Image (tube, grey):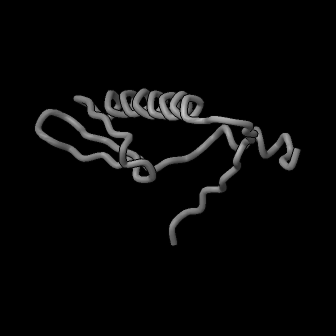
Amino acid sequence: MWYSADMKRASTKNIFTAVFQKGRGGYTVWLEEMPNVISEGKTRAEATHNLRDALALTLETNRIMSFKDVAGDVERLPFPFPVHAAA
């Protein structure tokens, strides 16, 4: 394989930026890098928990959709992507 075991392990941990917006009923929160992943909660802790669920469901759905859409001979490999802080 073209990737090392260390890269594979490292690629399982990603860091995203959660953006919280306080409103009347609590918080709305979304991921800056994935604006389609959005949730809410009465507290920041509840909103954070709900956001984790939303991200997990989005990734699972995308994976399922990818399997359904693929035809023919394909190869799936881990794709490590380093995250760099904005300057």
Residue farthest front in this picture = 72
Q: Residue at x 78, y 46 (%)?
A: 7
Q: Residue at x 35, y 30 (%)?
A: 45
* Number of numbered callouts drawn: 0
Q: Is residue 62 left or right of residue 67?
A: left
Q: Residue at x 66, y 53 (%)?
A: 81
Task: Check the image and report above or below for 39 versus 3.
Answer: above
Q: Is residue 9 left or right of residue 66?
A: right
Q: Is residue 80 left or right of residue 63?
A: right
Where on the picture, by quarter, is residue 84? Answer: bottom right
Name the foreground residue: 45 vs 68: 68
Task: Check the image and report above or below for 34 versus 41.
Answer: below
Where on the picture, by quarter, is residue 47? Answer: top left
Q: Quadrant of the N terminus?
A: top right
Q: Position of residue 38 (x, y in %)?
A: 33, 39
Q: Position of residue 82 (x, y in %)?
A: 66, 56
Where on the picture, by quarter, is residue 49? Answer: top left
Q: Residue at x 82, y 43 (%)?
A: 6
Residue farthest bottom in this picture = 87
